[in-house]
Amino acid sequence: MSARPGVIRQALMVAQKDLLIEVRSPSRVVGLFFFALALVVLIAFTADASPGVLRKTAGGALWLGLLLASTRALDLSYAVETDNDALSGLVLWPVHPAAVFYGKAIANTAVLALVGTLLTPLVVALYSAPIPGGWPAWGQYAVILGLGSAALAAPGTFYALLTTRARASSVMLPLLMFPLVVPALLSASRATTLLMDGDGMGEVPGWVSLLLAFGLLHWSLEGLFYGSIVEDS
Amino acid sequence: MVDDLSRRFGQRWAVARASFSLPRGEALMLTGNNGSGKTTLLRCLSTALKPHVGTARWGGVDLWEQRAACRPKVSLYSHASALYEDLSGPENLRTWARLGGYEPRVEQRLAEVGLELRPEPVRTYSAGMKRRLALARALLKEPELLLLDEPFAALDPDGRTLVLDLASRRRAAGTTLILATHIPEEAAKLCDRRIHLESGQIVEVA
């Protein structure tokens, strides 16, 4: 037997395992993409607004689509663990509970960021919202997409564990998660819209800082408390 | 080893005041009807469940209180296979081995349980093949205490013989076995002692 891996290595292994499962069953990511896409298209059609107004709603539509798709993604990420009680298997193996949390949160962040990346050209086209400013602006957009996905994934991974064995988990998760992620949703959508519609006042860094602070808070706190919940679940 | 151990679900005591000891390297069979408390007792010993009353000790150490240190030494093979259905058998074994820092030796471990290196996902396996793969996973740890919950379920006669053979080899290597079963005739070939449970209570020790 070689040395038992530390928490960080175990977290990366859990993330790798979750992402390998996503690769083996690509229908999940494809399903999430079309779910988010349907929302983005419906919002664009029902808004029935001029291109200028529509551009101002692009960030909100993108992040609303990602938020709603995230609940499905999070449910699915625990479905693979509960099918054969693999989550108990991880705890008893033992894999450190923080490694389970961070591994699953990293994988969920990657899935959301991928769906967001696939949605981007369609949002740009549907909402007449190109991102002016060349590569630096696209770089900022990538940072917002990454931070926003991480900010949704951490509380989502935590609350999905709480609700995974509840009878109405698909209802319980949004009820618990949505009020909590309002600051992340607001800052990500405002920063995205400002990038698309022009940031005359230089507000983007402020919104990105708020997103970063939200993410850091949740990635720290929920990693700490996950252990006591996963032992009881 | 097990002292006055009790565990309830809601108001119902699934295991009530169970006490017994088992020397290292021996094998114990748990028998009893459905709902008699065998699985709950094994889950308490595996540290999946916290006893509400009493203790279970292994090597002088309280299993629950010292669960982080005890878990690498204890393995539970049960109906819950802990396998990932979208991964192949080899991928499952490799993943679990890496997570625990164990030698994968995938081909050898699959051969031990009568399986081949197959790239198909586990969801395409038969129930018996899944049970065999779950056994290979449980043995990755090379545990000091091996808990077998209905180890013959879903297995053909060859599979049953294989479980008995692997378990007796582990026992010869010093592993302690506790086995819950509805087929005492098969398990009797392996076990030194038998405990019979009824409604969560030990009613017979033989």
Image: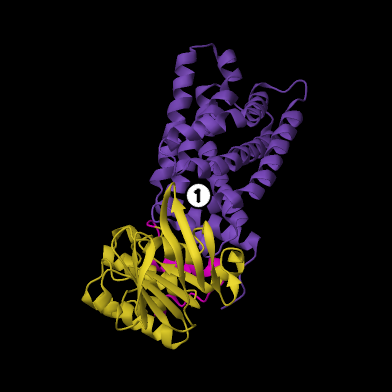
The reply to whether the magenta stretch includes residue A205 is: no
The quadrant in which residue B66 appears is bottom right
Is A179 in front, or is A30? A179
Please give the residue where the numbered disc 1 appears in the rendered image.
A233
- Asked if residue B126 can be seen in this view, the reply is no
Whether B165 is drawn above or below B147: the answer is: below
Q: Which chain is purple?
A: A
Q: Residue at x 72, y 23 (%)?
A: A199
Q: Which chain is yellow?
A: B
Q: Amino acid at mark 1?
A: Ser
Main secondary structure of the magenta stretch: helix
On the image, the x and y values in percent for residue A76 come to 44, 44
Whether A165 is drawn above or below A9: the answer is: above
Is A65 in front, or is A79? A79
B165 left or right of A9 in image:
left
- Asked if residue B141 can be seen in this view, the reply is yes
B183 left or right of B142 in image:
left
Q: Which residues are magenta?
A: B85-108
